[in-house]
Image (cartoon, rainbow, N blue to C red):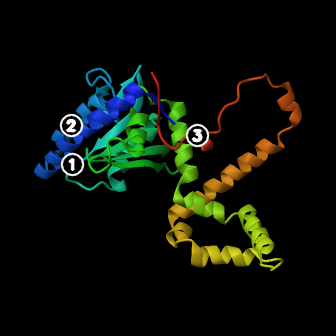
Amino acid sequence: MAKVSTKVATRITTQLKRYQSVLAGLLKRDVSEADTVTVINDMLSDICGYDKYLHVTSQYAIRGTYVDLAVKVDDEIRFIIEVKAIGIDLKDAHVKQAIDYAANEGIEWVVLTNGAHWRIYKVHFGQPIEKILVCELDAIVASAKSPEALECFGNLSREGFSKGTMAEFLLHKQVTNKFTVAAVLQTDFILEVLRREIRRMSSGVKVEVDYLKALLREEVIKRDLVDSEEAKAALQNIRRLQRAATRKKAAPKAADEEAPIVAPVEDASSSPPRAVAIPD
């Protein structure tokens, strides 16, 4: 996750609080998309710390079509932004074209916003091209001091954004969302632990793993956490992570013995769930 200084965290909370009243006024007036773009540009400067004349452009073209906004630092596009008028409810369909454009240019991150609501998407380069909704924030309703606000704007900020922090951001969201937790509960390992614990507490009552799995799926876990597309994707992700963990565990010890000594690196899956402010 992005680690931002106390100074940056203070800037985010102070400026977001100021913009909340601005956004509420714009929403009441139902301003146009062009006016919304102008405000987004200002928010990127005041909240996220970008120079709107140096880092933010509306003149970035992909296949002859200009994206609404692109954030560029050191000649590298960090993310592109699809902007809708503040009165329009955001839908995944709104970001489809921007996702396609980003994939064609090798850009990994796309933001969809109407100023009031912000969504951050990760582009998956494959056939077909896919998107992962990583973060969603109601910038008017959320407390300016909330972990969610710091997470969203801290990761997008000039100081907090990097490929490494965004990769950790994605991993954390993938392994801690409700669909993944529901999928983990249905894994063989957890079911076996549950079976043993029931037997231990009941002084020997036997229960089958298949029964426990059916019970969880049909009566304990919400239906949308079992049968939805998100649930299926979470199950696939769990299996991928399990295979990766198995390969890592099975790696020859000799390789570890020959490897150079390095400082331990924190597992991204156990990193703090929010962008973290650190003292200056």
Residue 228 in view of the camera: yes
- Looking at the picture, which amino acid does disc 2 mark? Val
Between the residue at mark 1 and the residue at mark 2, the CA separation in whole angstroms equals 10 Å
Q: Residue at coordinates 27% horizontally, 34% vertically from top-left?
A: 15
Q: Is residue 60 above or below residue 197?
A: above
Q: Which residue position holds label 1? A: 86
**Residue count near mark 2 (Cα–Cα under 10 Å), binned few <14, some 14–19, many ≥20:** some
Q: Is residue 138 above or below residue 5?
A: below
Residue 48 in view of the camera: no
Secondary structure beneath label 2:
helix
In the rendered image, residue 222, in percent from the top left (x then y), is placed at 52, 72
- The first of marks 1 and 2 along the sequence is 2
Q: Is residue 27 left or right of residue 5?
A: left
**Mark identifier at residue 165:** none
In the rendered image, residue 145, in percent from the top left (x then y), is placed at 35, 41
Between the residue at mark 1 and the residue at mark 3, the CA separation in whole angstroms equals 34 Å
> Is 237 in front, or is 264?
264
**Residue count near mark 1 (Cα–Cα under 10 Å), binned few <14, some 14–19, many ≥20:** many
| Furthest residue toward left | 29
- The first of marks 2 and 3 along the sequence is 2
- Looking at the picture, which amino acid does disc 1 mark? Ile
Dots 1 and 2: beta carbons under 8 Å? yes
- The first of marks 1 and 3 along the sequence is 1
Q: Is residue 115 above or below residue 50?
A: below
Q: Which residue position holds label 3? A: 271
Q: Which residue position holds label 2? A: 39
Q: Residue at coordinates 37% horizontally, 37% vertically from top-left?
A: 153
- Looking at the picture, which amino acid does disc 3 mark? Ser
In the rendered image, residue 148, in percent from the top left (x then y), is placed at 41, 45
